[in-house]
Image (cartoon, rainbow, N blue to C red):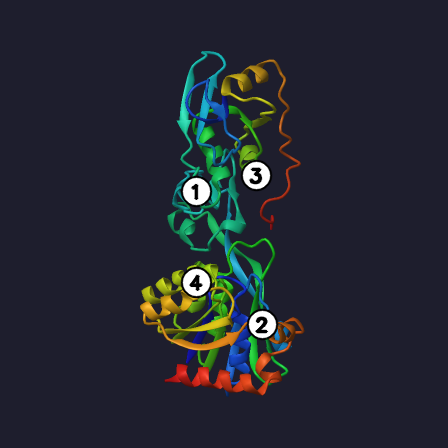
Amino acid sequence: MKIAVCAKGEGLKALVDERFGRTDQFVIFDMETKEVKTVENSAKNAGVGAGGQAVRILNEENVEVVIVPEVGPKAVDALKAFEIKAYRLGESKTVEEAIKKYESKDLKEFELNVVKGGLRRV
Amino acid sequence: MKIVVLSGKGGTGKTTISTNLAINTKNAILIDTDVEEPNSHIFMKPEIEDTISVTKDYPKVDIEKCTLCGKCGEFCRYNAILPAKNKVLIFKEICHDCGGCQLVCPTGAIKYEKREIGNIYCGTSKYGVKMKYGDLNVGEVSGVKIIENLKELVENEELVIIDAPPGTSCSTVAAVEGADYAVIVSEPTPFGVSDMKMVVEMLRNMNIDFGVIVNKAGLGDDEIYEYCDEENIEILQQIPFDLEIAKLYASGSILSHEIENYREKFELILNKIKK
């Protein structure tokens, strides 16, 4: 299973990013092979809808779990539609720390059904 | 003739100038295109005779016909349509209603539905002048469609005064487009002049003739006069920074209706513009 973390930099030592849709990179860790890959977030400069595009990028990388600071309402819809689970970063400072905390089940799952706010949902 | 009143910086007096020009011009119609925060009607006090709902199209995908090929998502510049695992997500509020996703869809799975983004109110003010204003619904991203509709409604009018939104964004460009003359209302402060310079650049790019009204004159510094002098920009009129004017504004009155001397000032402005 592949797990992604919003990051400011490359590899496991990178600091986590406080944004999801506009994070600089995603560091992707394969839980089975222990392989680490850094993917640029090409959605980060989108005028609007960065969150949805960031989820699409994760889907292309076959990510099943993403560790996030917060996610906006459009990203929530996209995470649900692509069946990607999200967990909150909590106090993690680096990508490595976040993954370790996820492995030891110390991170809270992001409740995708209760996020409100952002632009008006029409 | 279409005269647009704009400023760059907010709060410099666009509405003050627009409403005063409108009530002193024969056969004028005023449109308030600051649809995010219209306020001309607070001064004009129109009786609303007609309300027009403004709608925008958004895509609806027939999932039976859709093959999830992804072409619509690749095409959309605004990321408003996102094909996912077994459905297509639509973010209606960021859709710009361009019609592109339907064109690129190979299976004809996309149709459009309408949703309201705001309203246009039409009426006659207590000063006898006709006016229309747009009001964008809360949470909507863009009021350009309402501004375009407002302008279409007054296309054949003899004299239109357009109260523009602040700034130099898409909404302002939409309000200014097609105007015969632009009145920049600026205050003589560093902020006022800085934002005015952006407006000047925009108007020059759009090839629209313009002049400046210095509002709240006496405040700030002399930069605005030096700049207008250097750039050869005509100062049409000055309105002093005056407590009495502020009081009239705060009570919803129109300056030139209350003080005779100002009616002459505004008539002078109009005569200069018409030349």
Residue named by callout 3: A72
- From the viewer's perspective, is residue B234 above or below residue A13? below
Regarding residue B154, the answer to whether it shows in the image is no
Q: Amino acid at mark 2?
A: Ser
Residue named by callout 1: A46
> Which is nearer the N-term, disc 2 or disc 4?
2
In the rendered image, residues at marks 2 and 4 fall on the same chain: yes
Q: Position of residue B59 (x, y in %)?
A: 49, 51
Q: Amino acid at mark 1?
A: Ala
Q: Position of residue B144 (x, y in %)?
A: 48, 61
Q: Quadrant of the C terminus of chain B?
A: bottom left
Marker disc for residue B193: 4
User: How far apart are labels 4 and 1 at the CA level?
Assistant: 31 Å
| Badge 3 density bin: few <14, some 14–19, many ≥20, Cα 10 Å | some
Check the residue under mark 4 and report the chain it is in: B
Q: Amino acid at mark 3?
A: Gly
The nearer-to-camera label among 4 and 1 is 4
> Which is nearer the N-term, disc 3 or disc 1?
1
Q: Position of residue B139 (x, y in %)?
A: 59, 53
Residue named by callout 2: B40
User: How far apart are labels 3 and 1 at the CA level?
Assistant: 14 Å
The nearer-to-camera label among 3 and 4 is 4
| Badge 2 density bin: few <14, some 14–19, many ≥20, Cα 10 Å | many
Q: Amino acid at mark 4?
A: Val
Q: Of residues B87 and B34, which is closer to you in this image?
A: B34
Check the residue under mark 3 and report the chain it is in: A
Q: Secondary structure at mark 1?
A: loop
